[in-house]
């Protein structure tokens, strides 16, 4: 089985990297501060070695720990120096009950953390255990007075190493699962952004094609007044060629749609009367509008004028413009034949007017009565939300992940400290088993109270905070009583136990009032010990202060860990998000290009050739053959723009199928709706099947192709007469294929796995 480690390479997930970097920095800072704690113990003791030597050694280690934050290569030297100074402290200890071996014992616990913060592997467990055992054995050999303390150092280091290993595995699993979850969310977001980009590109392309080429072809096909001005018809065809070039990726911007709200007069066969706001006012307003709003409004107005020219039966149309403080209103009015808005499906209005205006947060109102003309009112707010629908969102809630990491680390620490403290107490003073287990049961109770309160809301309730603070004070006073308030054997004082409730309050108390209240209460107890103790007994008071420092310093370490975790996680998450946004944009561009590719395979160049023949004057607009060709091309293009923009993978193949069916005079009907395929390879396989059916079909054969989605999965259905399906059947694993004849119709049903 592979060793489970926290990822440390630059390519690792940001959760794992946040944990490792914050832990490394916290441990380095903590080890540096710890030297101050041991230095105080040296001053409170009567060491066997010179004071300057011991203080200088700890100062050097403190400096090295701070340098290791900046220079990672110094971490190995730091670990070696820590064990060396630990051995020095143990040798200098005058006797087992002195405060110096007590401080050295608890420093050994922190030293055990250092290898894990540097290397994060099972080797750290072996290294910590072996190093602590060697140091304890050497110290006991040189200074027999501290044999018991040396044994406690070895046991505590081993216990901490095992606990850290278990905690490391827990955090590694958490980090791995969190990174996997966010990677999955990122993949889903990329797929969603690609689909949205492709849908937006397809929708806009259909709008452009409808507003320009299809309308022009329809006008030429209808003949009459629409083609009376030959020069205008040819000029219009020339402009529409720009729209076709854009769809074929031969122009970089939308073409064929006039981006001005007051230049909507270039419509063959109709006169436009502009009323309301002046052109100067409109020009000033357009300068403050985004390109999107200006183009969408102009395109909608252009389509309304086109509709009036084609259907109203009038020679002129009125375009009324009104500018209000918060919105703009455009009314297109004609006095033509009118219609019943509830009885007629207005495809042009739905595609080019409603969707454009509503996409800007506006509204469209149609007032029309048969025989009494039509008024279409478009209202658009001037402050349009600039956020695009396909704009990527942040794939992870950084605060939520950081909070979960803090919580996991807290519970792992709580379990490790309680186990280690209880074991050490029993090792150092087995005769006081009941007392030791009793006071440590207070820590267990604090943990249970926190768990009960936190599991519902994620934070401590007021009652839980008060109860944990009270249990902490009872534990602290009971622990001081065990060592006779600084006059007894200080090595049995459970110094790390006080850290359990403090870390619980730090992690889960949002207001921090119980945390600060607990710290003030601890300070009050220490002050009371000093005030009520014998006069001039400063050494015992200093011993109590030193005994309290490991827990409080660990609390400081946890504060630093929380702060570093938030800083590093936020920094890495922001960097990850920036890279993610770039990937989203790249995927969106690729998806947009893929969406435009369908126009190339759909034979849009044939449409361009038809427009060129008119624009260049090679064919007269009144030609019957041209009108028939334009009518046929219009029907084909309308079939293309009806393909759902949400099925961008299959649309490429549907466009190929429609184009090939048209070339072979096969009557192809597509019934796919919004159903799309999840992978390019599967879409290609299905597309090739449909193309194969078309290639083997006879001229004028009617074929219906459906792509449907049900609870059982996605199904492709092909129905037609006298189809040669044997050569087109796929051999893909996992597909269920059913081919049968029913009443002279061939039916091919393919169910995807």
Image (cartoon, grey):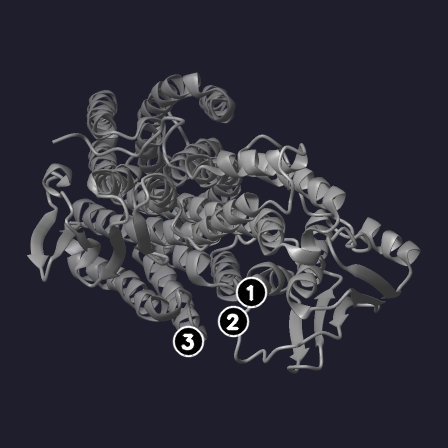
| Residue underneath mark 1 | 350
Comparing marks 2 and 3, which lies closer to the viewer?
2
User: How far apart, in angstroms, are the residues tagged by discs 2 and 1?
Assistant: 8 Å
Comparing marks 1 and 3, which lies closer to the viewer?
1
Residue 96 drawn at (x, y percent): 28, 37
| Residue underneath mark 3 | 463
Q: Nearer the viewer, residue 377 or 719?
A: 719
Label 2 vs 1, first from the N-terminus = 2
Comparing marks 2 and 1, which lies closer to the viewer?
2
Q: Secondary structure at mark 3?
A: helix
Q: Tell me, yes or no, whether the two marked residues, 2 and 1, touch with CB atoms within 8 Å.
A: yes
Q: Is residue 363 above or below residue 117?
A: below
Q: Residues within 10 Å of mark 1 (few under 14, many from 20)?
A: few
Q: Is residue 692 above or below residue 350?
A: above
- Would you identify the image quadrant in which residue 73 lies? top left
- Would you identify the image quadrant in which residue 170 lies? top left
Residue 652 drawn at (x, y percent): 38, 41
Residue 345: give its label: 2
User: How far apart, in angstroms, are the residues tagged by discs 2 and 3?
Assistant: 65 Å
Label 1 vs 3, first from the N-terminus = 1
Taking the spot 40% from the left edge, 35% from the top edge, the residue there is 17
Q: Residues within 10 Å of mark 3 (few under 14, many from 20)?
A: few
Q: Is residue 222 above or below residue 454?
A: above
Q: Tell me, yes or no, whether the two marked residues, 1 and 3, touch with CB atoms within 8 Å.
A: no
Q: Secondary structure at mark 2?
A: loop
User: How far apart, in angstroms, are the residues tagged by discs 1 and 3?
Assistant: 60 Å
Q: Tell me, yes or no, whether the two marked residues, 2 and 3, touch with CB atoms within 8 Å.
A: no
Taking the spot 35% from the left edge, 36% from the top edge, the residue there is 110
Q: Is residue 13 above or below residue 349?
A: above
Q: Is residue 131 left or right of residue 546?
A: left
Residue 602 drawn at (x, y percent): 42, 39
Taking the spot 51% from the left edge, 58% from the top edge, the residue there is 523
């Amino acid at each position: 089985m592979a060793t489970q480690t926290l990822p440390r390479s630059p390519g690792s997930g940001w959760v794992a990297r946040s944990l490792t970097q914050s832990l490394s920095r916290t441990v380095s800072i903590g080890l540096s501060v710890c030297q101050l704690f041991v230095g105080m113990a040296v001053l409170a003791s009567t060491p066997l070695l010179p004071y300057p030597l011991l203080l200088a050694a700890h100062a050097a280690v403190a400096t090295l720990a701070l340098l290791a934050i900046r220079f990672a290569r110094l971490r190995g030297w730091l670990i070696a120096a820590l064990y060396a100074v630990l051995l020095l402290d143990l040798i200098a200890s005058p006797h087992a009950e002195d405060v110096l071996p007590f401080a050295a014992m608890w420093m050994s616990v922190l030293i055990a953390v250092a290898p894990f913060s540097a290397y994060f592997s099972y080797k750290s467990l072996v290294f910590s255990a072996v190093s602590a055992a060697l140091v304890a054995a050497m110290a006991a050999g040189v200074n027999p007075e501290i044999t018991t303390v040396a044994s406690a150092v070895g046991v505590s280091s081993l216990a901490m190493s095992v606990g850290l290993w278990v905690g490391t595995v827990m955090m590694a699993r958490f980090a791995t699962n969190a990174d996997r979850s966010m990677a999955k969310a990122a993949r889903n977001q990329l797929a969603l952004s690609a689909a949205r980009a492709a849908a937006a590109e397809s929708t806009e392309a259909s709008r452009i094609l409808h507003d320009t080429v299809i309308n022009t072809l329809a006008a030429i096909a209808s003949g009459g007044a629409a083609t009376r001005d030959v020069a205008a018809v040819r000029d219009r065809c020339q402009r529409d060629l720009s729209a076709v070039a854009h769809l074929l990726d031969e122009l970089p911007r939308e073409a064929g749609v006039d981006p001005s709200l007051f230049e909507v007069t270039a419509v063959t066969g109709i006169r436009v009367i502009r009323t309301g706001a002046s052109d100067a006012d409109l020009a000033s307003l357009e300068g403050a509008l985004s390109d999107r709003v200006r183009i969408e409004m102009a395109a909608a107005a252009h389509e309304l004028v086109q509709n009036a020219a084609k259907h109203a039966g009038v020679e002129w149309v009125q375009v009324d413009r009104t500018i209000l403080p918060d919105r703009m209103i455009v009314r297109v009015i004609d006095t033509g034949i009118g219609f019943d808005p509830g009885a007629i499906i207005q495809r042009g209005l739905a595609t080019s007017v409603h969707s454009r205006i509503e996409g800007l947060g506006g509204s469209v109102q149609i007032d029309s009565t048969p025989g009494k003309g039509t008024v279409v009112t478009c209202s658009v707010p001037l402050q349009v939300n600039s956020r695009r629908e396909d704009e990527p969102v942040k794939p992870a809630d950084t605060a939520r992940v950081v909070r979960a990491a803090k919580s996991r680390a807290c519970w792992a620490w709580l379990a490790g400290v309680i186990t280690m403290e209880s074991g050490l107490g029993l090792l150092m003073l087995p005769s006081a088993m009941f007392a030791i287990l009793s006071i440590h049961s207070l820590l267990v109770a604090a943990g249970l109270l926190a768990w009960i309160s936190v599991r519902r809301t994620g934070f401590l309730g007021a009652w839980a905070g008060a109860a944990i603070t009270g249990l902490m004070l009872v534990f602290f006073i009971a622990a001081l009583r065990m060592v006779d308030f600084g006059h007894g054997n200080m090595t049995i004082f459970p110094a790390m136990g006080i850290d359990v409730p403090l870390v619980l309050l730090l992690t889960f108390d949002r207001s921090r009032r119980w945390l600060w209240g607990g710290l003030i209460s601890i300070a009050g107890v220490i002050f009371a010990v000093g005030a009520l103790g014998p006069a001039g007994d400063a050494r015992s008071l200093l011993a109590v202060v030193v005994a309290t420092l490991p827990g409080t310093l660990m609390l400081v370490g946890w504060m630093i860990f929380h702060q570093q975790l938030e800083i590093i996680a936020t920094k890495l998450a922001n960097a990850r998000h920036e890279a993610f946004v770039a990937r989203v944009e790249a995927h969106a561009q690729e998806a947009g290009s893929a969406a435009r590719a369908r126009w190339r395979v759909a034979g849009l160049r044939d449409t361009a050739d038809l427009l060129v023949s008119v624009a260049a004057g090679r064919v007269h607009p009144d030609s019957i053959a041209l009108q028939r060709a334009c009518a046929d091309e219009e029907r084909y293009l309308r079939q293309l723009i009806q393909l759902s923009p949400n099925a961008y993978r299959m649309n490429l193949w549907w466009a190929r199928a429609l184009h090939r069916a048209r070339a072979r005079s096969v009557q192809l009907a597509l019934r796919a709706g919004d159903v799309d395929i999840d992978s390019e390879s599967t879409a290609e396989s299905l597309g090739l099947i449909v193309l194969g059916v078309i290639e083997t079909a006879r001229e004028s054969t009617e074929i219906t192709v459906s792509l449907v989605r049900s609870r059982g999965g996605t199904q492709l259905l092909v129905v037609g007469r006298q189809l040669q399906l044997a050569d087109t059947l796929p051999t893909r694993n996992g597909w269920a294929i059913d081919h049968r004849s029913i009443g002279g119709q061939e039916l091919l049903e393919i169910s995807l796995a």
